[in-house]
Image (cartoon, grey):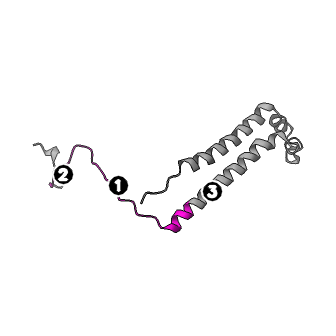
Amino acid sequence: MSSFDQDPAGGEPVQNGPILLVPPPRRKLSKLEIWRNRIFLLEVLFVCCFIGIILIIAPWTGYWTNNSLLTGFPRLKEFLMYDFVRGLISGLGLTDIWLGVSEVVRYREPAG
């Protein structure tokens, strides 16, 4: 046994292996907490779908082409009129909807 095998305070030897930790047991959720989680999940789904639909439709409407906020920025307005940019923003909307739906599919209530 060398002097490196002991704790600097001269106590127990230091373990040279992985330390396994057991997670604490899950507590049972009350009905109120379960319903709160469900309602929050529906809110996330609603917001993701709402924003996703707006991002899918908006680039192809007249509001996009006649945007008064961009009158001072003609190069930016020209860039936003490219079909590639419009498609990119619509794809972002599809991704947002997919994110909301995947959260609903992945949701699991605690057993018990």
Dot 2 amino acid type: Asp
Q: Which residue corresponds to mark 1? A: 23
For discs 2 and 3, the disc positioned in front in the rendered view: 3
- Numbered mark located on residue 63 in the image: none
Left or right of 19: which side holds 26? right
Dot 3 amino acid type: Leu
Q: Where is residue 37 in the image (x, y as percent from the top left)?
A: 55, 60
Q: Where is residue 5 in the image (x, y as percent from the top left)?
A: 16, 45
Left or right of 7: which side holds 65? right
Say few, some or many: other residues with alpha carbon within 10 Å of mark 1 (under 14 / 14 to 19 / 20 or more): few
Say few, some or many: other residues with alpha carbon within 10 Å of mark 3 (under 14 / 14 to 19 / 20 or more): some
Say few, some or many: other residues with alpha carbon within 10 Å of mark 2 (under 14 / 14 to 19 / 20 or more): few
The answer to if 28 sits in the magenta stretch is yes
Left or right of 2: which side holds 46? right
- Residue at image position (27%, 48%) is 19
Q: Which sits earlier in the primary sequence, circle 3 or circle 1? A: 1
Q: Where is residue 16 in the image (x, y as percent from the top left)?
A: 22, 43
- Residue at image position (81%, 38%) is 76
State the extent of the magenta-drawn residues as a range: 10-37
Q: Quadrant of the N terminus?
A: top left
For discs 3 and 1, the disc positioned in front in the rendered view: 3
Q: Which residue corresponds to mark 2? A: 7
Q: Where is residue 51 in the image (x, y as percent from the top left)?
A: 72, 49
Q: Which residue corresponds to mark 3? A: 42
Q: Quadrant for residue 74, please give it.
A: top right
Q: Callout 2: helix, strand or loop? A: loop
Q: Callout 1: helix, strand or loop? A: loop
Dot 1 amino acid type: Pro
Q: Distance between the residues labelled 2 and 3?
A: 53 Å
Q: Distance between the residues labelled 1 and 2?
A: 27 Å
Question: Would you say the residues marked 2 and 3 are in contact, meaning their CB atoms lie under 8 Å apart?
Answer: no
